[in-house]
Image (tube, rainbow, N blue to C red):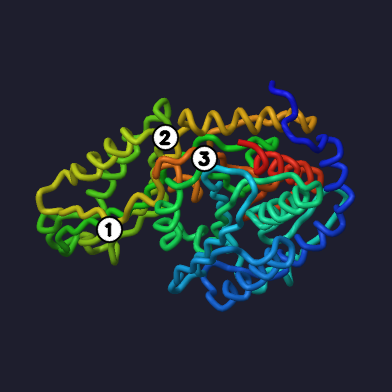
Amino acid sequence: MTSWPLSTPAADLTAWIADHRDEVLQEVRAYVEVETPSDDRAALQRGLAFVEDWIARHLGAPAGREVTDGGDHGDVVVLDLPGDLPGDPVVVLAHYDTVWPLGTLAEFPFSLDGDVLRGPGVFDMKSGLAQFVWACKALQHFDVPRRSVRLLLGGDEEVGSPVAQDVIRRIAPTAAEVLVLEASGPGGTVKTARKGVGLFQVHLTGVEAHAGLDPTAGASAVLALARVVQQLHAATDLSAGTSVNVGVVSGGTRPNVTPGKAWAGLDVRVADPAEQHRIDEVLATLDTGDDRVTCEVTGRWNRPVMARTPGTAAVYERARDLAAGLGFELGEIAVGGASDGNFASAAGAAVLDGLGAVGGGAHARSEHATVSGLLQRTALLAALLATA
């Protein structure tokens, strides 16, 4: 482990952040109580205005502001926050949309019980942005130079980042590294690899007929779907990190009609780009078992693989050493879920993900974050922003 690199002792940094605990928690609460469901543009606009005002009040007006229209979703905003250290900027990825519908707060309000924060979006990922803001404030207080930051605020991450992904692919290659404020893995681990995700639908068209009067005249799309589902599940290779799950099936009209239509929805996860190509070949060669039944595959790869590249490993090792200087261990994990970090990694950037909240229950009523983890990660983010 290298020695603590900042002029300000780690103990002083953590003590200052702890002294501002109540202010940090008040701001987390205020942010959580601005509901930002992915499918409500008006709510997302209110949320984005809150976030930008919050950042400007604490960190000053950004030197640059780029807006990409989000269409039906939230706009994507990139804020340039100049620093004092030379070199390429750090790109920091955050999203302000959540999976929770408008009105959730009435049934699942923000709460603080000892070390545990609860509320919609507190873990995924509103606490992460609070950590970033207060990390920058801590560096300001101690007059510690930090690196320049390009902060991306996405309003469509929970629906696959249809708008933000192009912005990320464009700015990520210009970054010294990309830090993602998504929630941490189990035990506070950071995420150095994520699987690629594909969401597809298989549509089968057969020949309808009277199942009782003329049982040989029809060609069953449901029977063909049963064959296709077996082929899809057979494509799973867990040793290679690949899973294929047919999660939804439907077909037919009535019990006495040979079904002419059937379809299935599937989720595919891959840990290796080569496996993505293999799955593409499987989807292109599905066999219905009956020449009269046709098969069409729709859908797409939702996110590319985020691989643990040498660049990512180097950023993790620096973060691990900084965490040790702050008095805690920082583990790493590869996960099946995806984030905007996948797009940055595929664009060639070194990416460290999962730097946000410590807790659990993402997308569930058990969603929670720990206060201790929030303060700890704020100090870590400060150290990361002040070192290269």
> Which quadrant is the N terminus positioned in?
top right
Q: Is residue 384 left or right of residue 314?
A: right
Question: Vertical placement of 278 versus 229: above or below?
Answer: above
> Which quadrant is the C terminus positioned in?
top right
Is there any visible trace of residue 234 in the rendered image?
Answer: no
Contact, CB < 8 Å: mark 3 with mark 1? no
State the image coordinates of residue 22 (x, y, percent, origin top left).
87, 57
What amino acid type should be assigned to the residue bearing mark 1? Ala
In the image shown, does 241 or 194 lie closer to the viewer? Answer: 194
Contact, CB < 8 Å: mark 3 with mark 2? no
Tag on residue 271? 2
Residue tagged 3: 351
Residue tagged 1: 262
Is there any visible trace of residue 211 in the rendered image?
Answer: yes
Q: Quadrant of residue 112?
A: bottom right
What amino acid type should be assigned to the residue bearing mark 2? Ala
Q: Is residue 353 left or right of residue 256?
A: right
Q: Secondary structure at mark 3?
A: strand
Query: Label 1: how many residues lie within 10 Å, few (<14), some (14-19) or many (20+)?
Result: many
Q: Secondary structure at mark 2?
A: loop
What amino acid type should be assigned to the residue bearing mark 3? Val
Q: Quadrant of residue 111?
A: bottom right
Please give the name of the residue rendered at 43% of the width and 31% of the height, measured from the top-left corner: 241
In the image shown, does 31 or 117 lie closer to the viewer? Answer: 31
State the image coordinates of residue 33 (x, y, percent, origin top left).
73, 68
Please give the name of the residue rendered at 85% of the width and 36% of the height, measured from the top-left corner: 11
Query: Label 3: how many residues lie within 10 Å, few (<14), some (14-19) or many (20+)?
Result: many
